[in-house]
Image: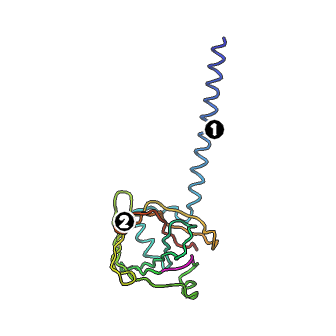
Amino acid sequence: MKKTRTLAAVFSLLAILTIGLAGCSSKSSKSGSTQQASFKNKTTKKADVKSTLTNSTKLWYVTGAVNAKSNSGMEAYRFNKDGKVTVYNVNKFYKTYAAAKKANALNKSGELNTTFKTKGDNTVINFKGKLSDIPMTQKFTVKKTLTGTNKATKLKVAGYHISRDIDNDVTQAVMVKVGN
């Protein structure tokens, strides 16, 4: 009799635990999909990443994280449809390219040629050219989409998590643009 009660209690606890975990799982997957509302249908496939970057006249900021702080500023990339990107050094996120220009915050570092390739589920962007008159190559491997808010400027941003490879030195970073 005592053994039956113990087994019933154990099965009841397992059932409650299973139901609770199932509820938490569905709740977290729903909140993850609402976080990426502006990039909802975007993927990291070559065509999607390439068109997202080259069809935008906005600056794409590359930094360690959405809220990373740097004494030397961060890089801002402005892509065009001709396979070129202009790289600037800026001190913060700006709402628009025009706002950054008006603030006299665009310190041009150089212009690079870009190519986009697909590697598995990821898009790889190769850059080649000169920055500050120094020849360089670098590679961004686009991993997944992200959205967030920069705390310092209170601007909403959307973009991608990337692995950044400069001369076989790979670092994790984000590449984001300020939302509309």
Mark 2 nearby-residue class (10 Å; few <14, some 14–19, many ≥20): many
Q: Residue at x 49, y 74 (%)?
A: 60
**In the rendered structure, which segment of residues is drawn in magenta?**
89-93
Residue 61, image x, y percentages? 50, 73
Q: Is residue 68 above or below residue 12?
A: below
User: What's the amino acid at mark 2?
Assistant: Val
Residue behind mark 1: 20
Quarter holding the N terminus is top right
Q: Residue at x 64, y 21 (%)?
A: 8
User: What's the amino acid at mark 1?
Assistant: Gly
73 or 66, which lies in front?
73
Front: mark 1 or 2: 2
Q: Main secondary structure of the magenta part?
A: loop
Quarter holding the C terminus is bottom right
Q: Which of the 4 quarters of the picture holds residue 149? A: bottom right
- Mark-to-mark CA distance, 1 and 2: 40 Å
Q: How is the image coloured?
A: rainbow
Residue 139, image x, y percentages? 36, 68
The numbered disc on residue 124 is: 2
Q: State left or right for residue 33 relative to residue 84.
A: right
Residue 124, image x, y percentages? 36, 65
Q: State left or right for residue 79 relative to residue 73.
A: left
32 or 113, which lies in front?
113
Q: Helix, strand, or loop for circle 1?
A: helix
